[in-house]
Image (tube, rainbow, N blue to C red):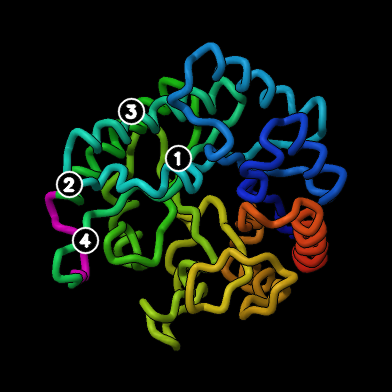
Amino acid sequence: MATPLGINLSFCVKRWVTPSLWAPVVRDRLGLDLVQFSFDLVDPTWPDEILDDLAAEIAAVPERHGVTVHSAFIGLAHYTFNQMLHPDPRVRDIAERWLGRAYRFAAKAGIARVGGPLGAIASRVDGAEAEAIPPADYDDLIARMRRLAVVAAEAGLTELYVEPTPMRREWPWTVEQARTMTADVAGSAVPWRLCVDWGHGTFEPLYGRYRARMEDWFEALAPEIGAVHIQQTDFQYDRHWDFTEAGAVDPTAAADLLARTGLADRPVFLEVFYPFERDDRSILEAVARSAAILKTAFSRG
């Protein structure tokens, strides 16, 4: 089975910021027809009249450009905040409302799925990091996830994603934590599933040199995984390099692993980030080359 291959629009931030710009780039320059929208391109807190117009533009993308918008992820801007694990519950409330507005925008834009990391507890003054977030914070997070599923269902979404990250201050960051979380939100108004990232599950400084393996995530959590992010990385940091860079991720081996673990039918999105000062042409060339490399690897079937 050929694995569905797309791209997260993270590479478009501050550059190809409207559908009339990013859709032709994706379809004509990259030769792809599947994208994951980024809320770095649209802030759900903007005025409703602006959001409605922007949503209508995105909703027209499949017919106008032949590109399907599979899902929307929160992006880097919102991720920089502690979101629903901030020490001040008022900030958690704001983050919950932010996601609710993101859900409503996505639904109007014809996007049926929304996801991303959900939050981070604050660091301790002494720099020590615990092996888990406090139980009260976890319970509060689960309650918010269940409330958000109701909001998503009312908006018309079909699926929500949580993205595990390789940090002890966020949740989940281990396979077992991910299994526990998906069990604790089972039966929500809209199902919560996982979007796992190749640079997160292979982060050796956290998991250890011989235990940082995507196999562990795929084999243990395959039924709960709805999408996958792929990037080039060296397993030392969450690099989000493209595949013109030298790294430890082999696209052919990645495709084979997905097939072996029963995940060949899940969409895989290239997720790459670039310095804002880098020139546009070199980014287009690098992303196009990366898309070609991945298409070769993932089109077998």
Closer mark to the observer between disc 2 and disc 3 = 2
Separation (CA) of disc 1 from disc 3 = 15 Å
Image quadrant in which the N terminus is located:
bottom right
Mark 1 to mark 4 CA distance (whole Å) = 27 Å
Q: Position of residue 27 (x, y in %)?
A: 82, 42
Give the residue type that dot 2 points to: Pro
Q: Which residue is mark 3?
A: 97
Q: Say what amino acid the circle numbered 3 marks.
A: Arg
| Disc 2 target residue | 87
* Magenta: main secondary structure: loop
Mark 4, residue position = 123
The amino acid type of the residue labelled 4 equals Ser
Going from the N terminus, do you reach mark 1 or mark 2 first?
2
Q: Is residue 271 above or below residue 99?
A: below
Q: Residues within 10 Å of mark 1 (few under 14, many from 20)?
A: many
Q: Nearer the viewer, mark 1 or mark 3?
A: 3
Residue 77 located within the stretch drawn in magenta: no
Residue drawn at x 28%, y 66% is 168
User: Judging from the image, what secondary structure is the residue with disc 3 in?
Assistant: helix
Q: Earlier in the sequence, mark 2 or mark 3?
A: 2
Badge 4 marks a residue whose secondary structure is loop
**In whole angstroms, how far apart are the C-alphas of marks 4 and 3?**
24 Å
Residue on which disc 1 sits: 160
